[in-house]
């Protein structure tokens, strides 16, 4: 089929744009021409440290594109359709797959788009066993390619919020204001939660969070986070100590300090949700878990259908969060820019 440009990973901070073969499409596959692909936080960890991937990997799973080839057995997907797609490589036979807990399958990342399988930092991407509503999600014609490329992270945000099961009157604190943290805040607001406080060390990210609906923002690099949260959502006394009174705390930062703060900020019996991916281990005082008895959630998954609805209705806006766009030939510069939290929020590569 010819050659295409792709950003290929060779090692920490070593990514090279090369000409590689355009994927061959089988009877159950589709081929998309990629329009734009965002750099995810997990991509940054992979690029910077080698986590999650191996040499030779083409990363990228936050993207939009147009279907250019459809396998003869694929139903309901046509050439010319715009969409985003993700293949999850679950085994289908393990303990968790048998219980339909697919995100817990040990083989998930070995055969998933942008991890074990080639991703969308390339001009074309193949999706195996393509099915509308499962691995392929159509996008409205009036949605621009950059907004469409944020469907996947907004889906993660929607899934995270739904796992938290927010109730009217809840007070929420979100740690981290990258695209997912900012989207988490907006989804809570879209679901009618009035008080959503956002903490972050990057002033530009805080400013965007404020513009897009955060009730209050806290600069974690300059302010006493716990004291400010106490002032905003109330003091939460617990056995032998006191913290804050947040009903729900979402860690979208992954920094050790943020992880540790969640256990002080949450009220006794509240909810802590972890969606940020740390590179370093945090120190956790388990006595706070024993005495405060929070519900602790690990959030790995996404609701892409809800993400399309939220973005189409503009209940969640991501365009203001796209701070940089680079052509594929400048993939390394794009990754280096994404690593600078004080200068960027979401960096995109376009084709």
Image (cartoon, rainbow, N blue to C red):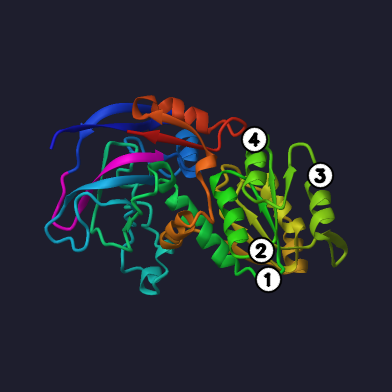
Quadrant placement of the C terminus:
top left
Compare marks 1 and 3 and give the one earlier in the sequence: 1
Compare marks 4 and 3 and give the one earlier in the sequence: 4
Q: CA distance from mark 1 to mark 4?
A: 30 Å
Compare marks 1 and 4 and give the one earlier in the sequence: 1
Q: CA distance from mark 4 to mark 2?
A: 24 Å
What is the secondary structure assignment of the residue under circle 4?
helix
Callout 1–callout 2 Cβ contact below 8 Å: yes
Q: Which residue corresponds to mark 4?
A: 204
Callout 1: few (<14), some (14-19), or many (20+) C-alpha neighbours within 10 Å?
A: few
Which residue occupies the foreground of this view, 34 or 235?
34
Q: Is residue 29 magenta?
A: yes
Horizontal and vertical percent for residue 201? Answer: 68, 38
Compare marks 4 and 2 and give the one earlier in the sequence: 2
Horizontal and vertical percent for residue 305? Answer: 41, 62
What is the secondary structure assignment of the residue under circle 3?
loop
Label at residue 193: 2
Q: CA distance from mark 4 to mark 3?
A: 19 Å
At 43% from the left and 36% from the top, the residue drawn is: 348
Q: Which residue ends up furthest to the front in the rendered image?
A: 142
Compare marks 2 and 3 and give the one earlier in the sequence: 2
Q: Which residue corresponds to mark 3?
A: 224
User: Which span of residues is magenta-colored?
Assistant: 24-37
Q: Which residue ends up furthest to the right in the rendered image?
A: 240
Q: CA distance from mark 1 to mark 3?
A: 28 Å
Q: Which residue corresponds to mark 1?
A: 168
Callout 3: few (<14), some (14-19), or many (20+) C-alpha neighbours within 10 Å?
A: few
Q: CA distance from mark 1 to mark 2?
A: 6 Å
């Amino acid at each position: 089929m010819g050659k295409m440009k792709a950003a290929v990973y060779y090692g920490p901070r070593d990514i090279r744009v090369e000409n590689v073969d355009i994927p061959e499409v089988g009877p159950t596959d589709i081929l998309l021409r990629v329009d734009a692909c965002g750099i995810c936080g997990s991509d940054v960890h992979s690029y910077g440290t080698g986590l999650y991937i191996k040499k030779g990997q083409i990363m990228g799973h936050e993207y939009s594109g147009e279907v250019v080839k459809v396998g003869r057995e694929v139903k309901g997907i046509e050439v010319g359709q715009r969409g985003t797609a993700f293949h999850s490589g679950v085994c289908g036979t393990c303990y968790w797959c048998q219980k339909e807990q697919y995100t817990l399958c040990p083989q998930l990342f070995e055969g998933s788009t942008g991890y074990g399988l080639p991703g969308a930092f390339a001009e074309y991407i193949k999706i195996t066993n393509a099915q509308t509503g499962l691995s392929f999600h159509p996008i409205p014609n009036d949605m621009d390619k950059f907004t469409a490329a944020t469907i996947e992270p907004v889906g993660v945000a929607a899934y995270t919020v739904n796992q938290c099961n927010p109730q009217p009157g809840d007070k929420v604190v979100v740690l981290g204001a990258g695209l997912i943290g900012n989207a988490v805040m907006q989804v809570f607001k879209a679901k009618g939660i009035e008080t959503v406080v956002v903490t972050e060390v990057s002033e530009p990210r805080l400013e965007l969070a404020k513009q897009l609906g955060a009730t209050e923002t806290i600069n974690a690099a300059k302010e006493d986070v716990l004291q400010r949260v106490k002032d905003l959502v109330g003091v939460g006394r617990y056995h032998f100590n006191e913290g804050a009174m947040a009903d729900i705390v979402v860690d979208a930062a992954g920094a050790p300090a943020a992880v540790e703060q969640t256990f002080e900020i949450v009220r006794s019996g509240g909810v802590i949700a972890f969606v940020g991916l740390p590179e370093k281990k945090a120190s956790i005082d388990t006595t706070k878990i024993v005495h405060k008895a929070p519900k602790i959630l690990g959030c790995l998954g996404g609701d892409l259908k809800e993400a399309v609805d939220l973005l189409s209705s503009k209940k969640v806006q991501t365009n203001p969060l796209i701070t940089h766009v680079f052509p594929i030939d400048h993939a390394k510069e794009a990754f280096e820019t994404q690593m600078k939290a004080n200068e960027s929020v979401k960096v995109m590569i376009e084709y």
